[in-house]
Image (cartoon, rainbow, N blue to C red):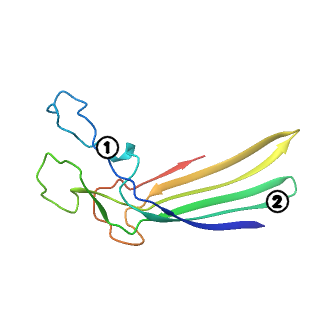
Amino acid sequence: MRAALTAVSRLDSRLFPIEPMAERDPPGHAIVADFSIMPGDGGWGIITSFQGFKTFGRFVAFASGSYLFSPQEQNDYLRRPDRPVTDPTSAYYTIGDQYAARIGVGTSVERIGLSLAARLEGVPSEDIIGGSNGRRRPAVQCSP
């Protein structure tokens, strides 16, 4: 069996306002795009990951996974800058943890590689390190 464990850091990347995309937005008024399509959350974190595989005759079992620890609680960018802040715990976006895992088996048949794997990824509702306030969409997705 072979395995590896790594740790790296995620650097700060900011949310950027975008120009109005709908007629209901006043001209020259910047809005914030949905955070699910933004290039970053304005935070930093520590990524831990592992990879491993083991051979069983003609088959190879493999697994990998990663977890992003984000100690910061919220960024400093308002979700709706055009509205007054009534609840500071959800007025800003959270800087949440993230995880991903993959497990499967592979083999080769007459010089063609075949594999079958499942992937699980998600955003937990609570962070392991740091606070959990702010707007987030906790979810889990599994793909065969």
Instruction: Indicate whether 66 appears above or below 23.
Output: below
Q: Label 1 to label 2, Cα distance in Å?
A: 44 Å
Instruction: Indicate whether 114 appears above or below 105.
Output: above
- Residue 106 lies, in percent from the top left, at 76, 49
- Residue 21 lies, in percent from the top left, at 25, 31
Q: Residue 55 — which label?
A: 2
- Residue 15 lies, in percent from the top left, at 33, 49
Instruction: Indicate whether 125 appears above or below 81.
Output: below
Amino acid type assigned to the residue bearing label 1 in the image: Asp
Pick out the residue farthest to the top.
23
Residue 84 or residue 18, whichever sits in front: 18
Please tell me which of labels 1 and 2 falls first in the chain: 1
- Residue 26 lies, in percent from the top left, at 14, 32
Identify the residue shown where x is 18% and y is 62%: 88
Q: Secondary structure at mark 1?
A: loop
Q: Nearer the viewer, mark 1 or mark 2?
A: 1
* Direction from residue 115 to residue 7 in the image, left or right: left
Number of labelled discs? Answer: 2
Instruction: State yes or no: discs 1 and 2 in contact (Cβ < 8 Å).
Output: no
Question: Which residue has dot 1 on it?
Answer: 34
Identify the residue shown where x is 23% and y is 40%: 31
Residue 59 or residue 48, whichever sits in front: 48
Identify the residue shown where x is 73% and y is 46%: 115
* Figure quadrant of the N terminus: bottom right
